[in-house]
Amino acid sequence: MYRRTSSDSLTRLWIEPKKNRVSGAELFDSLRFVQLETTPESMFDYVRCLKLLNGKFYLLDRMGTKLLCFDRDGKFLKKFEARGNGPDEYFMLCFLAADPVSKKILVADDVVRKIFIFDEFLNLEHVVKVDFTPKQVIAFRDDMILRYENDNKEQYQDSLLRDYDLHWIDLKGDVVQGMIRNRTPKYGLSFLSASGYLDNGDILYYPTLGDTVYRVAVSERTVSPAYIIESGDEDVKLLNDEQRREMDPNAELPEYEKRNYFFPVEFFNVGSHILLRSGMDDMYLYSKNSGNAIRYDKTLENMSGDRTFDYLTSIIYACDEDWCYGPHHAITLQYMAKDYGFSGKYKAMIDSMETDANLFLACFKVKDF
């Protein structure tokens, strides 16, 4: 279905050496809080996924038991909670996506192998039963679901699933082949492929263990390289397409971790910036205007200056234009304050929050650099 094409606007993005790391206070400003409404119906513990669509927040709780929707001011709007064995029920939701083009919310249950599709008001429209593990489902266009497969294809007997990463699924659950070949190790690399949306509805896809970010043009049915990741740090390893073809298919993840290979997790198109997260601690920002690249140090041990600000901006679950969003619990931060030397006006704001309140969202903008 997809054609490979070349790109006339290929951009090179640099992963800067560790010595150039900076703190959150140097990258972000305009910090504000959105307190999510606290009611028996809207309460939950921690966030597994957070997405934005048309000024509304969608949150999947840590255990994958419920999906909640709040407006931009934190007012609770609706919840989907239907655990069970029925046709429209689930065991555990593992993934959440918000398609900005179709205005659909997608969640997947990789245990009972179902994909749920909602409108932006959390009205359930479709439940698609599939015969494979539907981990990452990204888009819904023209009654077709776009899904990324990031497990090793050698684990599957079906040749249709063995060779490709990018799949279209119809509403009957049947798969149509895509065009990005998977060369991941034998070890199951769940949630390590990164993706993001462009303003025109195209999708950026960054496969595991690679140096190329692909542009998926949905309407034209083409896949082309959009960015090449290059490293100025001898401690970070990247694999080009030729090296990926020569990878040992029986290697396991720890072997690559020991060799410091780069594992992308999130790829955000943040207004005039690109934000790329690798693993738990490393984050890289690129300015589309200046071409500058910064490696963001988000470890507590290396924070300097206003540590409260640095920690609040170290957690990014979602982005919208130049704004970034991260979920926090006031009681957790109050316990951490002494151990990590939190201080300043933001600590005072946190100390004033109710400890039994729902979590809040830290909202902050990316500075020009």
Image (cartoon, helix red, strand yellow):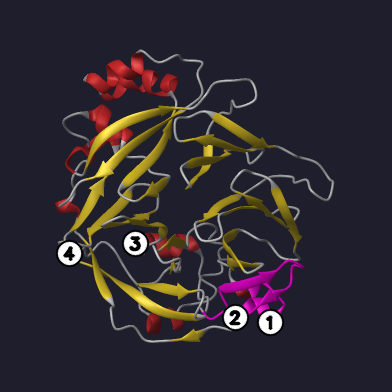
Give the spatial CA distance, label 4 vs label 3. Answer: 25 Å
Provide residue 182's location: percent of width, then percent of height.
Answer: 52, 75
Compared to residue 193, the image places residue 84 above or below, namely above
Compared to residue 245, the image places residue 299 above or below, namely above
Disc 2 vs disc 1: Cβ atoms closer than 8 Å?
yes
Give the spatial CA distance, label 4 vs label 1. Answer: 42 Å
Question: For the residue labelled by badge 2, is the local secondary structure a helix, a strand or a loop?
Answer: loop
Q: Which residue is mark 4?
A: 291
Compared to residue 222, the image places residue 270 above or below, namely above
Q: Which residue is mark 2?
A: 163
Q: Mark 4 or mark 1, which is nearer to you?
A: 4
- Residue drawn at the location 23% of the way across and 19% of the way down: 345
Residue 159 badge: 1
Q: Nearer the viewer, residue 119 or 14?
A: 119
Task: Using a 10 Å C-alpha cutoff, classify the residue at mark 2 as few (fewer than 14 neighbours), some (14 to 19) or many (20 or more).
Answer: some
Disc 2 vs disc 4: Cβ atoms closer than 8 Å?
no
Whether residue 171 is in magenta: the answer is: yes
What's the amino acid at mark 2?
Asp
Residue 260 badge: 3
Q: Is residue 343 visible?
A: no
Q: Nearer the viewer, residue 316 or 220?
A: 220
- Residue drawn at the location 38% of the way across and 49% of the way down: 320
**Quadrant of the rendered image containing residue 285:** bottom left
Provide residue 96's location: percent of width, then percent of height.
Answer: 57, 50
Q: Which residues are magenta?
A: 154-179
Give the spatial CA distance, label 1 vs label 3. Answer: 31 Å
Q: Mark 1 or mark 3, which is nearer to you?
A: 1
Whether residue 178 is in magenta: the answer is: yes
* Among the two numbered marks 2 and 4 on one chain, the one whose residue lies closer to the N terminus: 2
Q: Nearer the viewer, residue 301 or 178?
A: 178
